[in-house]
Amino acid sequence: MPVPLYEAKAEFFRMLGHPVRIRVLELLQDGPKPVRDLLAAIEVEPSSLSQQLAVLRRSGIVTATRTGSTVVYELAGGDVAELLGAARRILATLLAGQQNLLDELRAT
């Protein structure tokens, strides 16, 4: 029996639900990056980054290419960048709303 679409969507968002994975996706928006550059930018243990990259790779959201000993990751498609942009806009709106509420509280 196929998985209902809402369950597939929930699983997709669970896959995104890790700070290191989000940071990797943000960094890859600028183009392909070797693992060493991702490690330098994210500052996590290599084993932790490797684990999170494996999750992204298995999900199909990133691809990896090996050249010699260098592994380069890139986004599998442009929709991921659009999704991150939408998330940024939604978060900015939510935070602005919270700021307005804080301003109101302080004024009373």
Image (cartoon, rainbow, N blue to C red):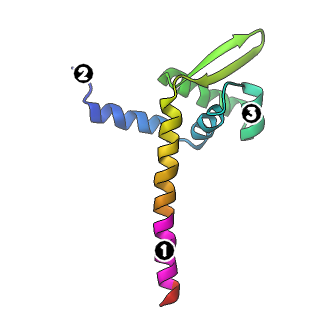
User: Which amino acid lies under the numbered mark 1 shown in the image of this protein?
Assistant: Asn
Q: Position of residue 17 (x, y in %)?
A: 49, 41
- The residue identified by callout 3 is 39
With respect to residue 47, does 71 lie above or below? Answer: above
Query: Residue at (53%, 22%) from the top-left corner?
Result: 76
Q: Which mark is residue 100?
A: 1
User: Which amino acid lies under the numbered mark 3 shown in the image of this protein?
Assistant: Leu
Query: Residue at (77%, 27%) from the top-left corner?
Result: 36
Q: Nearer the viewer, mark 3 or mark 1?
A: 1
Q: Looking at the image, is mark 3 or mark 1 earlier in the sequence?
A: 3
Mark 2 and mark 1 in contact? Answer it, CB < 8 Å.
Answer: no
User: Which amino acid lies under the numbered mark 2 shown in the image of this protein?
Assistant: Pro
Q: Position of residue 9 (x, y in %)?
A: 35, 35
With respect to residue 67, does 61 lie above or below? Answer: below
Q: Spatial distance from mark 3 to mark 1, Cα to Cα?
A: 37 Å
In what quadrant of the picture does the N terminus appear? top left
Q: Which mark is residue 22?
A: none
